[in-house]
């Protein structure tokens, strides 16, 4: 249901789908640690495969840093593979080293493979294919030129690339933008002024482009300061782009879009963890979360909904305590739902979900607020998913809130509304790898000792 390779964590990733329906994820990988040095710890891509976007099987390392003296000698960051002929072309972020002020020097490189399964890469030359143009983008200190994403141009036979960059005309803290470049052959690129430059974003990471059924475009971008992602739409790649607001709540990051086995368009994203798997641990790189269905109304903002493909992993309803479960309830007024308590025989709540109409929140031990949001409309129903420490809440079917909580014991879910308490039946979640016990396995609950 969530994935990280044994003993490691997952950061930004990319998805491929082969002709036989097999999915491949390529992802940045590194150890669980608070003192995360992305120049020394994100030096390779992990690879895993799946037939359903839920049950991922680790396949080892697929790509690593370049030889000494090259543009990617220090680190390799976010990548994007695209089908090219009978094989694949992969654009990726290379880091050559640091500026005098200690800032990573970033550029975009290219590798080819004769295969379509995310393996067999060979570099195209020893230099990057796209670099930041100082006429429009910050270079050197506090630069950004990473996270390439490439699609077919909708106005020519060529290609368009979007890149996370820093607008040189704005202060660093507000200069996060999406740069773009065009090419006829994937190897020679012309850089253009920013495609999107909001003016109130510090970093606009991991941009994703998706052409919609009516020919218009959707762009997703991850916002560094909020640790969530937002959406933009446009009638064509060249705009005009309209900002549609947050699509994923804080805690969901680095989204990718792909067609699911049932033909629906889904979004996968990463979710963090905490060092030591405790509430007091610092947040660190995390895991790949399960898919959400992407809905893009013709006259409204995009949204993420529950993906029915997950239903096959749910058991029959029960009211016994379950650590990994999904529960649904209708609401007509203020309600508070207890998911865990401080002892396995009940007691004070350790994890709760609350809603009083438009306000939705989660609390942990001692009532500490773990997360909150304001809904656009009062919710009539909630769906709650809990997998170990990871909790998601859907309001009227829309993904609205997520948090982490490592406290408490499983208990029967109960809801208190208007002074009355009722039991909430839940459907247990069947984990793809329930016996994993390495650092990247799903949290099994509090230690018995």
Image (tube, grey):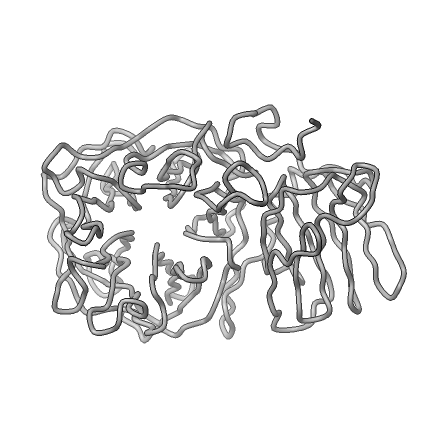
Q: Quadrant of residue 239?
A: bottom left
Q: Residue at x 31, y 42 (%)?
A: 38
- Please state, as top left, top right, bottom left or bottom right, where the N terminus lies in the image: top right
Residue furthest right in the image: 420
Where 276 sits versus 381, above or below? above
Q: In terms of depth relative to the viewer, which is nearer, 444 or 115?
A: 444
> How far from the left and from the top, in percent, is residue 181?
19, 60
Q: How many marks?
A: 0
**Nearer to us in this view, 144 or 297:** 144
Q: Is residue 421 left or right of residue 331?
A: right
x and y, in percent, of residue 126 in the image: 10, 39
Coordinates of residue 47 in the picture (x, y in percent): 37, 32
The residue at the point 75 percent across, 39 percent down is 410
Q: Residue at x 61, y 51 (%)?
A: 392
Q: Is residue 89 left or right of residue 320?
A: left
Percent position of residue 199, x then y: 32, 74
Q: Residue at x 16, y 51 (%)?
A: 99
Q: Is residue 211 above or below residue 197?
A: above
- The quadrant in which the C terminus is found is top right
């Amino acid at each position: 249901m969530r994935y990280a390779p044994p003993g490691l964590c997952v950061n930004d990733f990319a998805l491929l789908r082969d002709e036989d329906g097999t999915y491949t994820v390529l992802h940045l990988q590194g150890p669980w640690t608070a003192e995360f040095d992305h120049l020394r710890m994100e030096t390779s891509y992990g690879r895993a495969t799946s037939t359903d976007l839920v049950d991922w099987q680790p396949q080892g390392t697929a790509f690593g840093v370049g030889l000494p003296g090259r543009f990617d000698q220090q680190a390799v960051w976010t990548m994007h593979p695209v089908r090219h002929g009978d094989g694949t072309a992969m654009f990726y972020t290379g880091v050559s080293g640091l500026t005098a002020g200690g800032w990573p020097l970033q550029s975009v490189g290219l590798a080819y493979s004769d295969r379509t399964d995310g393996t067999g890469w060979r570099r195209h030359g020893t230099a990057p294919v796209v670099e930041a143009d100082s006429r429009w983008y910050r270079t050197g200190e506090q630069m950004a030129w990473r996270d390439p994403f490439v699609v077919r141009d909708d106005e020519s036979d060529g290609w368009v690339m979007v890149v996370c960059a820093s607008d040189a005309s704005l202060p660093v803290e507000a200069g996060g933008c999406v740069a773009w470049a065009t090419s006829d052959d994937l190897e020679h690129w012309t850089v253009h002024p920013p495609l999107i430059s909001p003016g109130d974003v510090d970093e606009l990471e991991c941009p994703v482009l998706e052409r919609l059924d009516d020919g218009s475009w959707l762009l997703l971008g991850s916002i560094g300061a909020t640790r969530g992602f937002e959406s933009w739409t446009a009638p064509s790649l060249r705009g005009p782009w309209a900002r549609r607001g947050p699509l994923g709540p804080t805690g969901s990051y680095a989204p990718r879009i792909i067609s699911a086995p049932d033909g629906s368009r889904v979004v996968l994203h990463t979710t963090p963890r905490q060092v030591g798997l405790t509430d007091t641990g610092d947040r660190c790189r995390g895991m790949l979360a399960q898919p959400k269905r992407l809905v893009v109304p013709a006259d409204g903002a995009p949204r993420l909904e529950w993906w029915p493909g997950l239903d096959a992993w749910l058991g029959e309803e029960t009211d016994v305590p379950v650590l990994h479960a999904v529960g649904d309830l209708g609401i007509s007024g203020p309600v508070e739902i207890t998911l865990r308590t401080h002892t396995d025989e009940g007691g004070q709540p350790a994890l709760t979900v609350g809603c009083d109409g438009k306000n939705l929140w989660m609390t942990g031990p001692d009532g500490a607020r773990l997360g909150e949001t304001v809904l656009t409309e009062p919710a009539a129903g909630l769906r709650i998913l809990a997998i170990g420490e990871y909790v998601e809440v859907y309001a009227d079917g829309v993904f609205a809130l997520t948090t982490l909580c490592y406290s408490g014991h499983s208990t029967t879910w109960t809801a208190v509304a208007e002074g009355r308490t009722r039991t909430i039946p839940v459907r247990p979640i069947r984990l793809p790898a329930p016996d994993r016990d390495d650092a990247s396995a799903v949290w099994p609950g509090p230690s018995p000792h």
